[in-house]
Amino acid sequence: MNFPRAIATGFRKYATFSGRAPRSEYWYWNLFLWLGSVAAGILDAVLFPTFSLIGPLFSLALLVPNFAVAVRRLHDVNRSGWWLLISFTIVGLIYPLLVWNCTKGTRGSNRFGPDPFEMEEVAAVFE
């Protein structure tokens, strides 16, 4: 999955917490969030020097899809989305989520759905 397709998938599945997201979708989405936050910060500094408006609105607008992509990423490594709550602890920030987000997803179907790469291959046949 490339950068534009990952962003389009993130918006298309805005509040979809079911299914799976491959590593590329997750990491490209996070790159998009980082680039958007930097751009919003620059715009805030130029347009609103005394307060921030664009940055918080950008973050708020993408809060739900950010959680949705993270949950689908956990599903890809056969973990429940509830594991995302561990990010509110020091241990969760340092080790498990980083490892799981860098780990290759489960090959084939798992309890959260079919392999996203198999779905891409089927879609490519019909294009």
Image: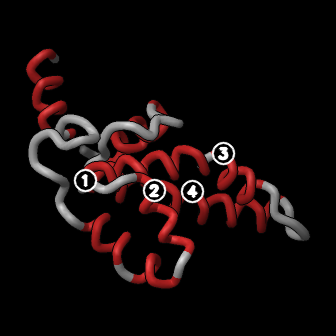
Whole-percent x, y for residue 11 in the image = 49, 36
Crowd class of label 4 (few under 14; some 14 to 19; many from 20; radius 10 Å)? some
Q: Secondary structure at mark 1?
A: loop
Of label 3 and label 4, which has the lower sequence position? 4
Whole-percent x, y for residue 125 in the image = 9, 20
Q: Looking at the picture, does residue 112 appear above or below residue 119?
A: below
Crowd class of label 1 (few under 14; some 14 to 19; many from 20; radius 10 Å)? some
The residue at the point 48 percent across, 70 percent down is 86
As rendered, which of 89 and 33 lies closer to the eye? 89
Instruction: Report the mark closest to the observer, 2 or 3.
Output: 2
Q: Which residue is mark 2?
A: 82
Q: Secondary structure at mark 4?
A: helix
Query: Which quarter of the figure has residue 79?
Result: bottom left
Question: Gap between marks 2 and 3, in whole Å?
Answer: 22 Å
Which amino acid type corresponds to the residue marked 4 in the rendered image? Gly
Q: How many marks?
A: 4
Instruction: Report the mark closest to the observer, 1 or 4.
Output: 1
> Is residue 66 found left or right of 95 in the rendered image?
right
Which of the numbered marks, if any, corresponds to residue 78? 1
Q: Looking at the picture, does residue 11 appear above or below residue 41?
A: above
Q: Looking at the picture, does residue 19 appear above or below residue 127?
A: below
The residue at the point 77 percent across, 62 percent down is 44
Question: Gap between marks 1 and 3, in whole Å?
Answer: 28 Å
Which amino acid type corresponds to the residue marked 2 in the rendered image? Trp
Of label 1 and label 4, which has the lower sequence position? 4
As rendered, which of 74 and 123 lies closer to the eye? 74
Dots 4, 2 in contact, CB < 8 A: no
Whole-percent x, y for residue 98 in the image = 35, 73
Which amino acid type corresponds to the residue marked 1 in the rendered image? Asn
Q: Which residue is mark 3?
A: 61
Q: Which residue is mark 4?
A: 36
Of label 2 and label 3, which has the lower sequence position? 3
